Amino acid sequence: MKTMKSLSFNLLMLMSLGALSLLFSCGEESEEPLPEPVSEFTVSNDNPLAGEEITFTNSSTEATSFQWSFGDGETSTDENPSHTYSSEGSYTVTLSVTGEGGNNSSEASITVKYPRMIISDGVFDIDGADTLGIDTYIFSVDMMAGSSSQIGNYPDDTDRHFPVTVSNDGSKMYYVDNFSGILYEANVDGSNETEIVSTSDLFYPSDIALDADGNFYVTDRGDSDTGAGAAIHKITPSGTVTQLYTDADGFEVPTAIVIDQATGDIYVNDVGATDSGYAADGIWKGNIDGSAPSKEISGGGYAIGLDPVNGMVYYNDAFVDGNIKMASTSDLSTQSKFADLDESNAYGIQYFMGRVYWSDLGPNISGGEGKIMRAAADGSNPTTVLTDLVDPRGIAIFE
């Protein structure tokens, strides 16, 4: 028979064990788990060009170490690395992070393009009579290497070939001899050169653009004193020429043209004629349907480009400010400076994949200091693509 003393002892033991159990239980419940890391990052440009450096900004939390994989076999352990892709393609970037609370990873897709560029460049020869003769060539440009190689030339060394453009599918290039008045077609490697339009149809063609159906639109400069003979020609792929606009529509010396293929809107740069006091000098807007054109901006030059996605026009203002300006197609009345020029004239401007490219004759015309430049669509981050050019004129960038 158990005594009262033994019962009390047993009860006391049970109470002690319960208290200890409760104490340890409370201790386990009060210990908070370690925070888990979260991998997160942004990229400065998810559509870069091959050879163009991009920066990754790490916004991960609760992470103490980082492991980047750029999808091209290259890696980094930097917190905020920069990287340059050497070839076009689609890449998956992975950021794996580690912290006291474990591991985590995140991904982003990068699409890299390696566009092709064709330019026209020439060599000046000045004889004793101070007249200018030019050998002009077409060059293919390697933008990563900053080099070019000749892919075409012309038989007559007195000709001047300024504009060059590429077919909508990127298989053909077109260029105009603005002394002999001939529109040429060739493969983009310079082979199989043929004449589309001969000298009897064009007087002094200065630029060329294509609509969505592959029709050509050529600016034909009129007499520099009177503006007589100025025209915007429409040329079918088979070579049929009609006049879309003439000097009767107000054009005097149209030098450059660009077309919005989605809307059919035409933008023309005109430097104006002397006898009128350069009345036509500026940017004009028309349409491939032939609707009445109108002068929208005063102050013209020799080149024009278009960003059809964001609705921006880029143009050379050669005689007022001697630079490149930009304006929204929805409000052409407001312009701002896009880029300075070493020399006031630019003969080629093109928008491609969020960037604007232009030719700059350099500080010493014919001194071998010409160059091709590139900048973001707002004019920031200007970069030299190609240097040591003699007389850079037309440019065409394509995939």
Image (cartoon, rainbow, N blue to C red):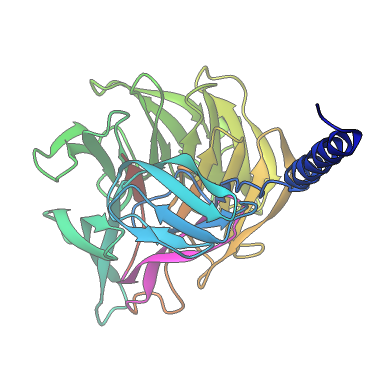
Where, by quadrant of the figure, is residue 29 drawn? top right
Residue at horizontal 30 percent and vertical 70 percent from the top: 132
Q: Quadrant of the C terminus?
A: top left
The answer to if 52 sits in the magenta stretch is no
Q: Is residue 53 above or below residue 192?
A: below
Instruction: Give residue 76's position: percent from left, percent from top.
Output: 40, 62
Residue in front for this viewpoint, 171 or 5? 5
Residue at horizontal 80 percent and vertical 45 percent from the top: 23
Where, by quadrant of the figure, is residue 265 drawn? top right
Q: Is residue 397 above or below residue 149?
A: above
Looking at the magenta stretch, what is its main secondary structure?
A: strand
Residue 213 in sight: yes
Residue 182 in sight: no
The answer to if 387 sits in the magenta stretch is yes
Residue at horizontal 51 percent and vertical 73 percent from the top: 342
Residue range corresponding to the magenta coloring: 368-390
Residue in front for this viewpoint, 35 or 13? 13
Q: Quadrant of the N terminus?
A: top right
Instruction: Give residue 309's position: percent from left, percent from top.
Output: 56, 32
Residue at horizontal 57 percent and vertical 55 percent from the top: 99
Residue in front for this viewpoint, 241 or 17? 17
Q: Is residue 11 above or below residue 137?
A: above
Instruction: Give residue 351's position: percent from left, percent from top.
Output: 47, 45
Considering every residue shown, the one lying at the far bottom of the view is 128
Where, by quadrant of the figure, is residue 158 drawn? bottom left
